[in-house]
Amino acid sequence: MGRYAESLPQVKRKGTEQRPAWYVHDRLVVRLQDAGTAVIRVPLSKREALLESYPDSFGVPPRMEAHHKVEAYLDEADPDGVRAAIDLAWEMQRR
């Protein structure tokens, strides 16, 4: 996940060793929440389609419902889905 995020133009790693995060223009793209969960920024307008396409990969806990975020469950997540979510985040945040 981190290598993919860093492969996108202008993405930089920040955060800590335990909770690394990747940003573009100081705007969050993706952050490792814990060993099995990542938080990814996605536009609200695209979130439902992402959840429908990859139901076992992502979720939106109640605390994130009003935010442009999803949780990626890395142990079950489809790698293509995670990359798609990171792409959405990068597109949204690079502007």
Image (cartoon, rainbow, N blue to C red):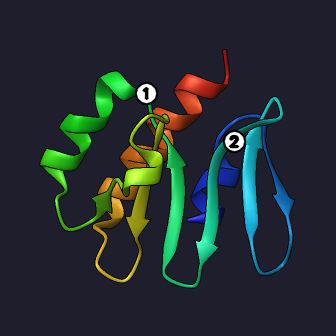
Is residue 73 shown above or below 9?
Answer: below
Find residue 68 and report its horizontal and vertical position in percent.
48, 34
Find residue 87 and report its horizontal and vertical position in percent.
47, 39
Is residue 24 shown above or below 6?
Answer: above
Find residue 71 and report its horizontal and vertical position in percent.
43, 59
Q: Nearer the viewer, residue 43 or 2?
A: 43
Q: Say what amino acid the circle numbered 1 marks.
A: Pro
Residue pictured at 38% horizontal, 42% vertical? 65
Label 1: how many Cα within 10 Å (few below 14, some 14–19, many 20+): some
Q: Are marks 1 and 2 in contact (CB under 8 Å)?
A: no
Q: Quadrant of residue 93?
A: top right
**Label at residue 30:** none
Label 1 – label 2 distance at C-alpha: 12 Å
Q: Secondary structure at mark 1?
A: loop
Disc 1 target residue: 43
Find residue 33 and report its horizontal and vertical position in percent.
61, 70
Disc 2 target residue: 28
Q: Residue furthest top?
A: 95
Q: Residue furthest front?
A: 62
Residue pictured at 75% horizontal, 43% vertical? 23
Residue pictured at 55% horizontal, 24% vertical? 92
